[in-house]
Amino acid sequence: MMYRNSASLPIGLPEVNAGILLGMAKSTRPITRTAFGERLFKAREDAGLTQTEAAQKVGMGQTTLAEAERTATGSSFTAALADLYRVRAKWLATGEGPRDAAVESAPPWPLERITPAEWKLLSPTERALMEDAAILKLRELRAEVASRPFVAPEKAHRRAAA
């Protein structure tokens, strides 16, 4: 039973049945979304995630995500959400280009002790320093290998057997 005012219009009070609160009356007004918000909503739904799950995974609040899905024209979380939803960031941001990320064509992650998520947390300066250190180490290893005498694989096998 819905409470009604004197003009018999719904006034949004909760429905009550035998003292049990049934909830607020549902709005019949359709949800309007921005184009960006619609892409966010559709990608999240297709990924099978709730707003709470998606927001937690990218480090944003659920209400912030809910608002973005309705009224936003962009977000600082667009790239992270695109990765999570497995869609292209450009498509999510602008609606242009292919929707789905080409996961198969991505090269394998080259590092064993640093995850992609940890790498993304590094500042550009930290990334540059790590890349420089890796290049220097690679050069050292190549110089060390180049200074060793070459042993053909067959000969190395014979020596080990002897």
Image: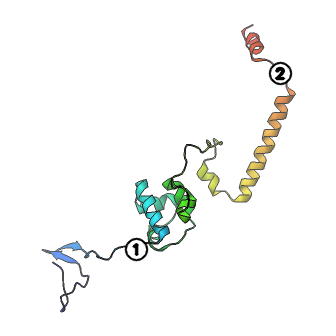
Query: Quick check: marks 2 and 1 in contact, CB under 8 Å?
Result: no
The residue sitting at the front extreme is 97
Residues packed near mark 2 inside 10 Å, few (<14), some (14 to 19) or many (20 plus): few
Colour basis: rainbow
The label on residue 51 is none
In the rendered image, which quarter is residue 24 located in? bottom left
Residues packed near mark 1 inside 10 Å, few (<14), some (14 to 19) or many (20 plus): few
Q: Given this view, does label 2 or label 1 mark the residue nearer the observer?
A: 1
**Residue 63 placement (x, y as % from top left):** 44, 70
> Label 2 vs label 1: CA separation?
70 Å
- For residue 135, above or below residue 41: above
- For residue 126, above or below residue 15: above
Residue that label 2 marks? 150
| Residue type highlighted by circle 1 | Thr
Counting residues from the start of the chain, the first of labels 2 and 1 encountered is: 1
Horizontal side of 134 relative to 19 (left or right) equals: right
In the rendered image, which quarter is residue 66 located in? bottom left
**Residue 75 placement (x, y as % from top left):** 55, 68
The residue sitting at the left extreme is 18
In the rendered image, which quarter is residue 147 located in? top right
Image quarter where the N terminus lies is: bottom left
- Give the structural element (helix, strand or loop) at label 2: loop
The residue sitting at the top extreme is 162
- Residue drawn at the location 45% of the way across and 59% of the way down: 43
Q: Nearer the viewer, residue 108 or 90?
A: 90
Residue that label 1 marks? 32
- For residue 32, above or below residue 125: below
Image quarter where the C terminus lies is: top right
The answer to whether any part of residue 32 appears in the image is yes
- Residue drawn at the location 55% of the way across and 61% of the way down: 96
| Residue type highlighted by circle 2 | Phe
